Each structure stands twice: as C-alpha cells, then as structure tokens.
Image (spheres, rainbow, N blue to C red):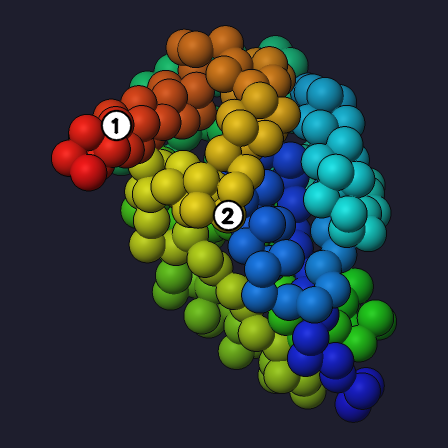
Amino acid sequence: MTDIDHTRALVVFSGGQDSTTCLFWAKRHFREVAALTFTYGQKHAVEVEAARAIAEKAGVAWEAMDVPLVGALGHNALTDTSLLMDEEKPAAAPPNTFVPGRNLFFLSIAAVHARERGIRHIVTGVSETDYSGYPDCRDAFIKSLNVTLNLAMDEQFVLHTPLMWLDKAQTWALADELGVLDLVRRETVTCYNGIAGDGCGHCPACRLRRAGLEKYLKTKLEGDENQ
Ligand code: ZN
C-alpha cells in the first residue's frame, strides 16, 4: 500500500454550488486540499472555467480530466444537444439529465487519482435530501462504493459527503458559515443552461437553488430580527 497522508483531501469539484461549498468545507477540515474537475462533453464549458477560477481563489491545486466516455455511454440531456432538459422530475424514472453511472465512474477515477498522490480522503457534494431522482447521490450507494473501492485497491479511502443530509437551504447556511455565501452565489454554475450565479431561473437546478436561497435568507433575516 502507498503511504497515506491523513491531512490531505481530494474534492470532486464541478464548480457548482454543492461542490464549491464542499471545497471550502474541505479547506476547513484538511491542511491541504486538491480539486479534480471532470469534463465529459457537457454543453457548457463555462462550468469548467468557473471551477478553475474558484479553485484559484480558494488557493487549491486544480486539475481537469476529460472523461468523455462517461457522457457518451448513456443517453442524457447534459451531453446530447438534441434533447431538451426535463423541466419537471418525471414521477417514476430519473430525469433525462441523469448521466447513468456518473458518480460511480467519477468517484472510482477520483480514488485512483487520489491513491497515486497518497491521498485517502475524498470529498463529494452529493445529497440524498434533494437528490432529484439521481440514485447515485444516495447514502447507501456512497457507503457501498466506499467499501468496494477499499476492496478493489486494498486501501482505506474515506468518502466524505458533508451535504448528504442537508437540503438546499441548509447548504446555503453552510456556505455562509464558511464565509463564502457571496462567492458561491455569484461564481458557481449550477444552472442546466450554463448561466453562472443566479442562472436562467427556470431550469430545475435554478429553481431548487433559488428556493433554497430564499428560504435560508428568510430564516437568517428572522434570526437577525430576533436578536
Ligand atoms: Zn437554470
């Protein structure tokens, strides 16, 4: 086994609200943080540029890795320009923005990448609370994969999921607590139409993000008034 440094973490980092909050969470909990951004034929290069810029501001080492296979294997609206995004979550199936196997591939690749660098802590921004029908954002999947990765490489990886049980409002609260609410609000790209900050306003990701922000800001305002 490789020599493992317990003070370093690798963040799977898309440049969106969730993984940016995780990046700053990791900076608080680990001495040294690195960020890894996967590209897989997303329609919006602006996401990758946002990730690079945020990593630079955060002062963490950043790498982008092109894994087009992940987007090409399954038919989905994030990489296929002929498909319109589902505006509403379908009742029985994951929405067409679901990229089958994405987190399985990403976290497996991240683990090998981390292992090469002697890093055992891997941070991902998945959340079961607002999981929008994506099965690979659920806690059971992450725990299962953590065991599998350790068996696969005879290592002691720890997959950290700081947002697993937080809703979007609580994720904003965490960003605020970490002192990066404005940065997350202005510089991250969560929007399925690739518009930074508050986004297009009407795609499912924008609506979820904005509802969470409004809920958090309202709670904060009420808290301030009561002091
Ligand atoms: Zn949007």
Image position, residue 50 (x, y; %): 71, 28
Residue at 37% from the left image edge and 21% from the top image edge: 210
In the picture of the structure, the residue carrying the numbered disc 2 is 178
Spatial CA distance of label 1 from label 2 is 18 Å
> SS of the residue at dot 1?
helix
Neighbour tally class for label 2: few under 14, some 14-19, many 20 plus, Cα within 10 Å = some
- The reply to whether the residue tagged 2 has its Cβ within 8 angstroms of ligand 1 is no
Residue positioned most to the front = 227
Image position, residue 73 (x, y; %): 66, 40
In the picture of the structure, the residue carrying the numbered disc 1 is 221
Inspect the image, locate mark 2, and give the three-letter code of the amino acid beneath it: Leu
7 or 42: which is nearer to us?
A: 7
192 or 18: which is nearer to us?
A: 18
- The quarter in which the N terminus is drawn is bottom right
42 or 61: which is nearer to us?
A: 61
Q: Is residue 181 left or right of residue 102?
A: left
- Residue 3 seen in the current view: yes
- The reply to whether the residue tagged 1 has its Cβ within 8 angstroms of ligand 1 is no
Earlier along the polypeptide chain: callout 1 or callout 2?
2
Residue 145, compared with residue 28, is above or below; it is below
> SS of the residue at dot 2?
loop
Neighbour tally class for label 1: few under 14, some 14-19, many 20 plus, Cα within 10 Å = few
